[in-house]
Image (tube, helix red, strand yellow):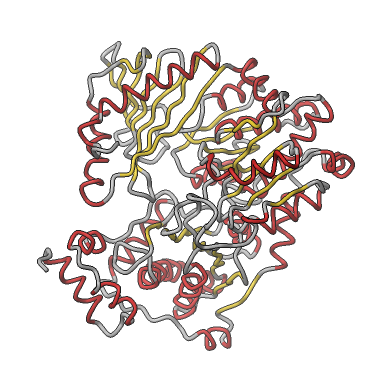
Amino acid sequence: MLLEGKIEEKFRLWTESEYFDLETKTELLEIKDQKEIEDRFYTDLEFGTGGMRGVMGSGTNRMNKYVIRKLSQGLADTIREEGSEDCSRGVVIAYDCRRNSAEFALETALVLAANNIKAFLFDALRPTPELSFAVRFLHAIAGVNITASHNPKEYNGYKVYWEDGGQIPPAKAKQIVDKIAERTSWMVQPLDQDEARERGLLLSVGREIDQAFLQVIKNQLLYPGFARDFGNKLKIVYTPLHGAGNKPVRQVLEEIGFTSLFIVPEQENPDCEFSTIKLPNPEDPLAFEMALSYASEQQADIVLATDPDADRLGLYAKDEKGSYQRFTGNQIGVLLEYYLLSQKKRLGKLPEDVTVVKTIASTDLGDSVARYFGARTINVLVGFKYIGEQIKQMEENGSGTFLFGFEESHGYLAGTYARDKDAVEAAALLAEAALYYLEKENKTLPEVLEEVFKLCGYYLDEQYALTLQGREGKDNINRIIDLFRTSEQRVYGGLRVISIDDFLTKMSYFPKEGLKKEMGQPELPQENVIRLRFEGGGFVIIRPSGTEPKIRFYFCIKGESSQEIRYTLEKVKTDVLNLIQVYLPQNV
């Protein structure tokens, strides 16, 4: 087998060194496809917007216990530079239902313990937002969650959080990457588990944090007494999609009064194979098939689904005709934003400096709703960690009161108890909103969304992702983004481009005037993202995924009616895909 020098060197190390176990060596030696070996060793998994994520398997470009150990050592080296006091504050570690998640969590804890850093390890799977909350609750220096969120079953991941409970900021992430690079050896030895516990370096946590987490969620509700009195009138079907949301979501809903709650039995319990669904992602309509079937039987008012680590929430709601309408991530975000702003205003509890934070790829309708209520909107790069950073900055600078944050990929947070999106809280708030509108205004959630459109404008948003695997795929992703950076095309689907915003150079080009100007948000970090803004409103954003071999396109179309913008969206998508055909696989 002929391999490139560095790839062959890595392959031989992993198949010959005594450090790597027999299972790892056997898996690698049984691979006969040279391209497969190259893909496993041509690079190392890297940090993205959500940490590190990849397909499980042996090799430097896969998720396995050796990659986990090396990454954990980089985290340990970073914490040790903070000083002994921060080492004693410890790191909170959680994990989801995926294959190897519990093992990877324990490996992380024992590597930290080997560095005299205390590890608080959850006693069973927990939601990502609870990990964020727990870092703050325990005053830990950092947190780690072993999860691949909504990705297919072959994936797992490693998300790092810092002391404020937010995903690790870019400067700290770079520090970890530098520490990993400084240690050229793969040989990282975890501490023995019994010794770690005896020395007080490995501690189990669970129930106390659960109770505190659910209580702060209840504190975010606007009408807690209303749900206690009338909650049984709202019929809810919920599916955790085999993930970590089952216990906390059903517990909080039942405790606040939503007793007409039906859990999809086939998807209730943890299952690392996700055997009833193709993709455990509430963004995917197919993930709702079972839940919608039960919803028809139960005559449910709303249908909720959470992803495996319960940080993303999907929604279907019955309309006035009795049919179930799917809500996109943007529409759920706008609905929650509208509910919180309108009801806080009604209650006289809306601060003058109230602020909504959303990502640049999320709908412009969110900005329009905020303007309607006199609220400020801050737009940040894609990744909920940037929303968390804004919460921290507002608290430190006294420059605004955070109300709500959302991203189009079904992530939402109201309040400051955590620094990551929370599907457990979103489920409680959506249930309360649905009950309020049903009982007080005799409206379904689809009718409320139509009300928002009439007040603030019609918008249609959609995300389109292309998977481009391997080294060639990574190169083509960069070529596609460069193409939009330099293309002379100025009209897509009949919509004229008024500006091309380059988040890498921080410059905006205005074709009509032939001018280049600095972007209006210099505080945003540099990122290889292009945004085409359209005359009259709306945009297309092109960016690489931070955690998967994908390029993502975000479309936001504004118009006079739902029918008009749907037609325009399809035309815009067609023009965008025609432009990049040369870089796509033949079957796309």
The residue shown at (20%, 47%) is 472
Q: In which quarter of the image is residue 521?
A: top left
Q: Can residue 468 be seen in this view?
A: yes
Whether residue 517 is visible:
no
- Residue 121: image location, x then y, percent: 58, 72
At 72% from the left and 50% from the top, the residue drawn is: 217
Q: For this rendering, which residue is in front, 192 or 469?
A: 469
Q: Quadrant of residue 440?
A: top right
State left or right for residue 216 relative to residue 381: right
Q: Is residue 142 above or below residue 335?
A: below
Which is more toward the observer, 57 or 210? 57
Q: Can you say whether 276 is above or below 569 in the image? A: below
Report the residue at 24% width, 33% height from top. 482
Question: What is the quadrant of the N terminus in the image?
Answer: bottom left
Using residue 476 as the reference point, say whether residue 257 is left or right of it. Answer: right
Q: Depth check: 228 or 577 in front? A: 577
The image position of residue 292, as x and y in percent, is 64, 41
Number of marks in the image?
Answer: 0
Residue 448, by quadrant, is top right
Q: Residue at x 22, y 51 (%)?
A: 471
